[in-house]
Amino acid sequence: MADRTSPLPPRPDSSPARSWWGWGALDQALSDAECASLAALVPGAAGTPLPVPSIASLDLPPVRVGAPAPLAHLLSSAPADRASHTYGKAFRDVVRALYGDMAAAPDLVGHPRDERDVVDLLDWAAGADVAVVPYGAGSSVVGGVEYRAGVHSGVLSLDLSGLDRVLETDRVSRAARIQAGALGPGLESQLRPHGLTLRHFPQSFAFSTLGGWLATRAGGHYATLHTHIDDLVESLRVVTPSGVSQSLRVPGSGAGPSPDRLFLGSEGTLGIITEAWMRLQDRPTHRASASVVFERFPDAVEAVRTIAQSGLHPANCRLLDPGEAALSGVATGGGSVLVLGVESAHGPVESRLAELVALARDHGGSPAEEPPAAGGSALGAWRSAFLRMPYLRDGLARMGVISETFETACTWDRFPELYEAVHRDVGAAVQKVTGASALVNCRFTHVYPDGPAPYFTVIAPGRRGSEVAMWDEIKAAAMETLGEHAATVTHHHAVGRDHRPGYDRQRPEPFALALRAAKRALDPAGILNPGVLFDAATT
């Protein structure tokens, strides 16, 4: 039977104050001194950090559309709201914010409190020719929340953070009905009293929402098996300009094409996800981890392939190449490091970890000595670096250093050539654009029996005032390289606007025709997140 939450539980604890211009929490941003110290590691970086402009100093464009009286209580044109909803958190977003470029600021920010408010705001926007850009917590790194179309009378950023409750739990079936605006920590805090967890922990966990995860097909905690949020969806409820879609809540179905699959990954272009029934798990109580060092990266890759095809399904299976291992502080001796983790809510996991380590040892790996502290030294160092990296990226941006990350997936047979091509071709593009050599690192975020999901980091000095143009050229070169080697343009960061060229080449044309037809049927006025997945004027 279901435990119905009535009345609604208290709202979850508020998240820390967030930066309007950069990643994450305000109190975690690097100081000027820390920025300068970090940039000393990059030859050619600027000597002083760009100052962070105050919101009061920003030159925001005039508001072009007024709030209608019946909806005025849901809408804001306050400078702080408009500035903080202008961009996501990609490198080019952070740099433009630092330079005070607010040309893309929305006219209004909507704060619906429930689904009825979402319907009312969409009805008004469709009639007023106002574009609607759904906004969860703004952690997009692909231009997913920035309006660029320039063909509408106004722009509304629709902030769903007010829809943040776990509405209903079904302990028997291990599922919950959750509103789309729930941030990761708040969602988990509401599930904890039931002994349940969604167990979806992307790097943006504290600064992203369930609806954002669903709309972008986000990758989460598990490196194998249940890698994407898709795997955890039981049913979706979506508000479209043409009506509300509610899929049947069942564990599985063969009844035609899946309505949920239509909206998963649609990035707010077909409708606004307002809630979802999500599959949950018992909270794990047994955990074990280990790290394995390899002298040769190709041996480490073969070890991971064997593990991915073993059926042992480790929760964590992150491989760091020598550069990434050094950058993360996990290893400094020039070796590659494989971080393994297993977990269970039902019984000990040490024997499964031992099997995984044995497979790695068979391929030349040497298990690292780990202290008894939870997580071990390599895992602890990797986790700390993983969570801290976006703040370091922002610090480098303030010092004129270009930092680009892009992730993909390919089959195992294609990976060696792809790895070499990225270092060669993207490295050559960086040399051409910046006049300097790039640091190019790689790690595996997720792995499958048929291939890995490599995540590349590129760092190089830029030129003050030209950082965005230089980043754009490097990004284009990276997408070209991925396309040439039959790798996806994105594994878990979504398409947004930045990945559109690569997505247009990757998407089969018959599917594109069907998707455009769905767009016309569900959003006839063309107001939903124009420019994402489709050209705003040609859908």
Image (cartoon, helix red, strand yellow):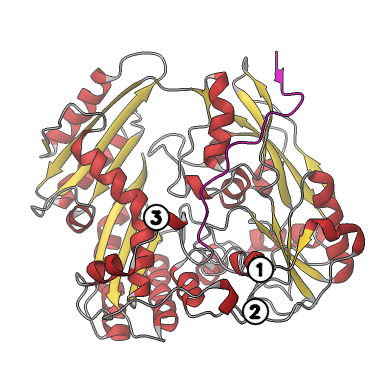
Prevailing SS of the magenta stretch: loop
Mark 1 lies on residue: 82
- Cα–Cα gap, marks 3 and 2: 26 Å
Amino acid bearing label 2: Leu
Could you say which quadrant of the image residue 257 lies in?
top right
Q: Residues within 10 Å of mark 3 (few under 14, many from 20)?
A: some
| Neighbour tally class for label 2: few under 14, some 14-19, many 20 plus, Cα within 10 Å | some
Q: Which mark is residue 131?
A: none
Element assignment for label 1? helix
Left or right: 511, with 498 as reference point: right
Which residues make up the magenta segment?
1-19
Numbered badge on residue 60: 2
- The percent position of residue 260, horizontal first and vertical second, equals 68, 42
Residue 380, quarter of the rendered image = top left
Image coordinates for residue 235, horizontal then vertical, percent: 69, 35
Q: Which residue is mark 3?
A: 28
- Answer whether labels 1 and 2 touch (C-beta < 8 Å): yes
Q: Does 10 appear in magenta?
A: yes
Q: Nearer the viewer, residue 478 or 150?
A: 150
